[in-house]
Image (cartoon, grey):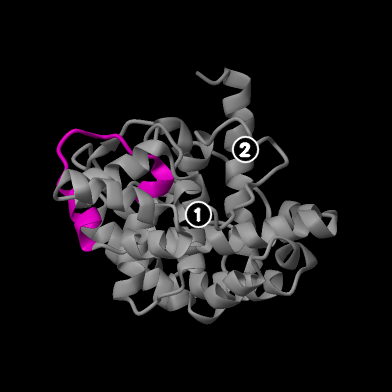
Amino acid sequence: MLQVEERARWKANAWRLHQIAVLAGEAGSPRASPGKDTFFRYRMAAVTIWLAIRASITHNEVPMVRANCRARFTAADFDFIVRTLARSQTDQVSLVDLLSDVETRDSILDHPRLVDAILNHCGHLRISSQFYFYVLARHVLQQGGIGDRKLCDYVASLLETFSHASRLQISDETHRLAEQYISDILIALSRATPEQAFLLRAHVGNYSLFISGIFHPAVAGQRSLRGGPDIEFYEQVGRTNYQLVASHAVARRCELDDVFEGLADRFRDVRLALNQLSDQLLNLDDDARPSLCL
């Protein structure tokens, strides 16, 4: 369990990150009218995710998302692939050999039976979260006409990062978080180093994609709330910030410039694919979906 002091500090930081997302598009209201409807519940659930992210995220840091889910697959993941796809002992031996080749591995990961096995499995899935999100993200992105595996890997890593929470439900305490003034965020951005600014901008793009992709029912209801940003707002914010970081030296050094360019160019297409993921493949409201044994 996190200490009370740590949780309080992370809550303040989570709300600050949300306000940065609002600021980044040069639009929106400094205040949003709270309520108990579905929109506010989902919107605050997104903030709550940040409260339970692992201890590597401290008060003044945001996560550096990388396109590295495939590089972090575990032995259990490969065992799952072999058990799912092999029809005989001979097939198992052949698959193990084939998985050692990167290009062949990528082709095998596109097999539709992997998606079916994940979605139809009852009980605990003994696979890693990075494997889980890569297979599902790859599935919906391909359906949306996006075949770039590296971009898919980044989106899967983004989902994994934002979903590292013990639960996605919100608490009463979250509703009582005080809003911070936009001027506070302007000060934070103006004092950021170039690398910190890169991380903040990348996070704003990631946050906008995650909110509008996974929590889109909440965003769709924002028009009815005074000052509530809509889907187009998040698309503009996300696209703009991805464009800004695509040309940054850090992006080139991390070999993410092409990923950010792709996300900027096809933000809406990726967002729609994540809408399908949220609507059809994920269940964020209860424990009905398969759980992972990590």
Residue range highlighted in magenta: 112-132
Residue nearer the viewer, 32 or 189 = 189
Find residue 152 and report its horizontal and vertical position in percent: 45, 65
277 left or right of 230 in image: left
Q: Residue 71 location in percent, x, y?
A: 52, 50
Residues 142 and 100: in front is 100
Of the two numbered discs 2 and 1 on the same chain, state the one appearing first in sequence: 2
Q: Look at mark 1 in the image and give the residue it sits on.
A: 158
In this rendering, position of residue 283 left or right of residue 34: left
The vertical placement of 74 against 209, above or below, is above
Residue under the image location 53 percent in, 81 percent down: 265
Total numbered circles:
2
Q: Position of residue 206 (x, y in %)?
A: 55, 60
Q: Nearer the viewer, residue 271 or 126?
A: 126
Q: Which mark, by number, is residue 200?
A: none
Q: Residue at x 23, y 40 (%)?
A: 290
Dot 2 corresponds to which residue? 12
